[in-house]
């Protein structure tokens, strides 16, 4: 008598299901739009805990390759001079102009009990935002964002957590 074996991946999924430990999926539904004024084309702006402070007006930008910090936040965090390291790569603003850089600073961003350290490029230019979080932060935490639903969701401690835009 022969026994057919499932591929290792399917076998693993079966054993997780049997133990009740299936990984939740991250997704958005119409329910996630409740409380959001529709229609809209708003950017996703959230409040994040950066270096122990609740920082408002943080833009979540999937198209950006680096985290950016603007002067007001940088001054407000009162960093030590040695916290800022040199950063010599050019950075171009939304208007296509080269931006003056002050340097780079590594800071923790905390959501609930989850903490990820990221490198912010400190710029010397005006913005209505205090900071921009980009793909490095999104990928490190496994964040899935939706401007339509005005939320970010991520998996932590076996469940889906979310941050609602403001």
Image: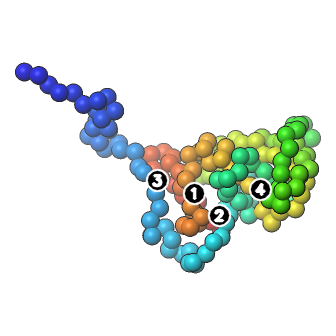
User: Taking 38 as reference, is 17 above or below it?
Assistant: above
Q: Earlier in the sequence, mark 1 or mark 4?
A: 4
Q: Earlier in the sequence, mark 2 or mark 4?
A: 2
Residue 160 image point, x, y percent:
48, 53
User: Taking 97 as reference, is 119 above or below it?
Assistant: above
Which residue position is annotated with label 3? 26
- Secondary structure category for the residue under label 1: strand
Extreme-left residue of the structure: 1
Q: Earlier in the sequence, mark 3 or mark 4?
A: 3
Residue 11 image point, x, y percent:
28, 32
Answer yes or no: do the residues labelled 1 and 2 have beta carbons within 8 Å? Answer: yes
On-image quarter of the N terminus: top left
Q: CA distance from mark 3 to mark 2?
A: 18 Å
Which residue position is annotated with label 4? 131
- Secondary structure category for the residue under label 4: strand
Q: CA distance from mark 3 to mark 1?
A: 10 Å
* Residue 96 marker: none
Which residue position is annotated with label 1? 145
Residue in the foreground of this view, choosing between 61 and 140: 61
Could you say which quadrant of the image residue 129 lies in?
bottom right
- Secondary structure category for the residue under label 3: loop
* Residue 113 placement, left or right of 134: left
Answer yes or no: do the residues labelled 2 and 4 have beta carbons within 8 Å? Answer: no
- Secondary structure category for the residue under label 2: loop
Q: Earlier in the sequence, mark 1 or mark 2?
A: 2
Answer yes or no: do the residues labelled 3 and 2 have beta carbons within 8 Å? Answer: no
Q: CA distance from mark 3 to mark 4?
A: 25 Å
Q: CA distance from mark 2 to mark 4?
A: 12 Å
Residue in the foreground of this view, choosing between 114 and 16: 16
* Residue 44 marker: 2
């Amino acid at each position: 008598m022969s026994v057919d074996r499932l591929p290792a991946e399917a076998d693993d999924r079966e054993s997780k299901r049997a133990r009740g430990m299936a990984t939740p999926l991250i997704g958005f539904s119409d329910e996630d739009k409740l409380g959001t004024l529709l229609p809209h084309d708003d950017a996703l702006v959230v409040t994040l805990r950066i270096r122990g402070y609740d920082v408002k007006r943080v833009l979540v930008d999937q198209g950006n390759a680096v985290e950016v910090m603007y002067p007001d936040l940088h001054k407000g965090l009162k960093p030590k001079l040695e916290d800022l390291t040199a950063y010599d790569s050019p950075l171009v603003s939304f208007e296509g102009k080269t931006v003056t850089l002050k340097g780079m600073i590594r800071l923790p961003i905390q959501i609930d009990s989850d903490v990820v350290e990221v490198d912010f490029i400190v710029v010397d230019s005006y913005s209505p935002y205090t900071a921009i979080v980009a793909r490095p932060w999104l990928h490190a935490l496994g964040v899935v964002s939706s401007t339509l639903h005005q939320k970010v969701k991520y998996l932590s401690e076996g469940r889906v957590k979310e941050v609602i835009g403001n």
